[in-house]
Image (tube, rainbow, N blue to C red):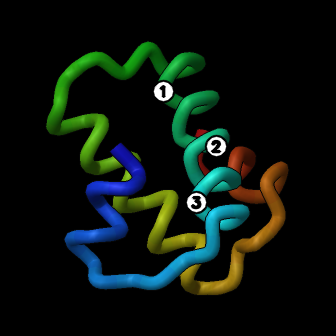
Amino acid sequence: MIRSQIADAQTALSDEEVALCQRVFDHISSVREITTDTEREDLAQRVIHSYQHGVKDEAALMRLLI
C-alpha cells in the first residue's frame, strides 16, 4: 500500500524510508484493525504526508497517527 501511494504522489524515497513508512503503516493498520481499502489508502497517505513534512522518527510517526 505504501509503495502505491508513493508512486501516486510521485515522491522519491529511499528503500530505508519506504521500509520505515511500511512498518508504521503495518503497525497502525493492525492496532486500529483497518480493513477497508479506503481506510488503508487514507492511512498510507497520512503516513507519507507526515514523513515528508518532517516526522522522520518511527516512534513519533506511530504516536502521531495512532
- Quarter of the image holding residue 11? bottom left
Q: Nearer the viewer, mark 3 or mark 2?
A: 3
Q: Whole-percent x and y of residue 50?
A: 55, 71
Residue tagged 2: 24
Residue at image x 64%, y 43%? 24
Which of 31 and 19 lies nearest the eye of the viewer?
Answer: 19
Q: Secondary structure at mark 1?
A: helix
Discs 3, 1 touching: Cβ within 8 Å: no
Q: Whole-percent x and y of residue 57?
A: 82, 64
- Spatial separation of the CA atoms under disc 3 and disc 1: 16 Å
Q: Whole-percent x and y of residue 10?
A: 29, 83
Amino acid tagged 1: Ser
- Quarter of the image holding residue 58? bottom right
Residue at image x 75%, y 72%? 56
Residue 14 as seen in the image, left or right of residue 35? right
Q: Quadrant of the C terminus?
A: top right
**Sequence-first disc among 3 and 2:** 3
Residue 8 as seen in the image, left or right of residue 55? left
> Exactly how many numbered labels are in the figure?
3
- Spatial separation of the CA atoms under disc 3 and disc 2: 10 Å
Q: Secondary structure at mark 2?
A: helix
Q: Is residue 35 above or below residue 16?
A: above
Q: Is residue 30 above or below residue 48?
A: above
**Sequence-first disc among 3 and 1:** 3
Amino acid tagged 3: Val
Which of 12 and 36 lies nearest the eye of the viewer?
Answer: 12
Q: Secondary structure at mark 3?
A: helix
Residue 29 numbered mark, or none: 1
Q: Nearer the viewer, mark 3 or mark 1?
A: 3
Residue tagged 3: 18
Which of 58 and 4 lies nearest the eye of the viewer?
Answer: 4
Other-residue count near label 2 (Cα within 10 Å), few / some / many at <14 / 14–19 / ≥20: many
